[in-house]
Amino acid sequence: MPKSDVTELAASLEEYLGDPHDADSRMPFAQILDHDVRGEYPYQFVALLRRWGLHLRCLPASDGGLAGNVETGMGLMRLVARRDPSTAVGLALNSLGFMPAWILGTPEQKGALIEDMKRGSSVSWGLSERVHGSDLVANEVLAERTEGGWLLTGEKWPIGNATVADKMVVFARTGKRPGPAAYSLFVLDKWRAEPGTVSDLPFEDLYGTRALDLSGVRLDGAFVPDSAMIGREGQGLEIALKTSQTARVVLMHLALSAVDTSLRLALDFAERRVLFGDRISDVPYTRRQLTEAFADLMIADAMVLGAARALQAAPEQISVWASVVKYQVPTLLQKTMSQLTVVLGARTFLRDHPHYGMHQKMVRDILITDIADGNTVVNLRNLGHQLAGLLDKAAEPGEGVREAAAERAAVLYGLDRELPVYEPVKQEL
Ligand SMILES: Cc1cc2nc3c(=O)[nH]c(=O)nc-3n(C[C@H](O)[C@H](O)[C@H](O)COP(=O)(O)OP(=O)(O)OC[C@H]3O[C@@H](n4cnc5c(N)ncnc54)[C@H](O)[C@@H]3O)c2cc1C
């Protein structure tokens, strides 16, 4: 999509949502803070964004959505997340749930999921298990063959949107022996399961993104037909890891948005606050803190932009890009947030202040970017595994390698350069 069209789309979404400081707008800070304090799922925000069609901007045009690239949907999601990360995550989790089908689903599976989402239905991503966390090949949810399909048994937790979503893509063990080829993926329709075979787990009371539904599901022989399997039997781990690569990049929009909002609040405060006869924005140390925060945001923005475009322009390198941003962006921007906390001072403590109260929320909400979809340590380790090979290549690049890298960088950062169609199946592990 040409840059001018993206800008126009973003302006139209901003206009639709209105001024967040205006209590009568569609998504005002005061109401967002109220949801946050009560830990209440933002149904009406999610609904009004779906009516605008935001979720379709993150689903492939070839199967009924409106997305041609990753960057546009992510850019629009940033506008939502700088108002409310909980709402943005609540919506974005649908694209995450859809991602396995985008990677290796049949046209029928993709079309059906998108059709459901157009009618207001949601799909969640059931990968994690309470006992096993990052150790995916220890996961225990079991899929056993039965006539015409499979019976799923076990527990998925903690899962975003697990309760509010009608469907869940479940990562389950199909192989007899443990190992990477022992897992497969199934689309579970919670409303078609026999009574007693699917139970929702309670909503957790959260520290950050408090309005999000973070819960889980208990399965006791829940039936899924053969047609619900995504990819082939045994391909579950490969698809799950590719799904995580995209999720790691896309989730970073939230870190940028959190700092975007906090920086605006800190700047506004610094320009209004007068101490010892001067505005504090004229105090050199405060000026420097604000300028550094802006520079951090620009650095992180550039990294995320490159990674998002790499999903399309360099899918063979995305394993590195995704882990670099998933480590570096939350690490850098949490430091930035601490700096902005110093500028805002006592205002940071005002939880329900309709203006400055948003900062303390963003300080908590940004943490999800550190933890979900492979925490920073897991990503450092992923980079560590690849470091020797990367350094060898840098020290002795073969013929044409530097030229190819320069051309790739020109595409990644040349916003007017066309990107190839997004084909997540091409991502390499
Ligand atoms: C808000 C939120 C939303 C979520 N949404 C979903 C969802 O929609 N679907 C879903 O499936 N899951 C979801 N999760 C789960 C999330 O992805 C988990 O955080 C993930 O499974 C990691 O598990 P854990 O946090 O329990 O950490 P653990 O895996 O228990 O790790 C604990 C610590 O051990 C160390 N460690 C772990 N692995 C390694 C390693 N390989 N190398 C070195 N050190 C390591 C690290 O220090 C790490 O911090 C969500 C979580 C949150 C908080």
Image (cartoon, rainbow, N blue to C red):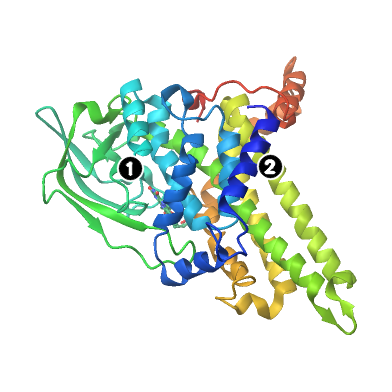
Q: Which picture quadrant has residue 293?
A: bottom right
Judge whether residue 387 can be spotted in this image: no
**Does residue 277 appear to the left or right of 38 in the view shown?**
right
Q: Secondary structure at mark 2?
A: helix
Q: Assess whether mark 1 and mark 2 are in contact (beta carbons under 8 angstroms).
A: no
Horizontal and vertical percent position of residue 406? 77, 24
Which mark lies nearer to you, 2 or 1? 1
How far apart marks 2 and 1 lie (CA) works out to: 33 Å
State yes or no: Cβ of the residue under disc 1 lies below 8 Å from any atom of ligand 1. no
* Marking on residue 121: 1
What's the amino acid at mark 1? Ser
**Does residue 161 appear to the left or right of 149 in the view shown?**
right
Which residue appears at 54% of the width and 68% of the height? Answer: 30
**Does residue 6 appear to the left or right of 33 in the view shown?**
right
Which residue appears at 86% of the width and 70% of the height? Answer: 285
Q: Nearer the viewer, residue 42 or 398?
A: 42
Which residue appears at 63% of the width and 23% of the height? Answer: 419
Q: Which picture quadrant has residue 83?
A: bottom right
The answer to whether residue 248 is above or below residue 63 is: below
Q: How many marks?
A: 2
Considering every residue shown, the one lying at the far front of the view is 24
Q: Secondary structure at mark 1?
A: loop
Judge whether residue 153 can be spotted in this image: yes
The numbered mark, 2 or 1, whose residue comes first in the sequence reads 1
User: For mark 2, what is the residue?
Assistant: 303
Horizontal and vertical percent position of residue 136? 37, 44
Q: Nearer the viewer, residue 372 or 212?
A: 212
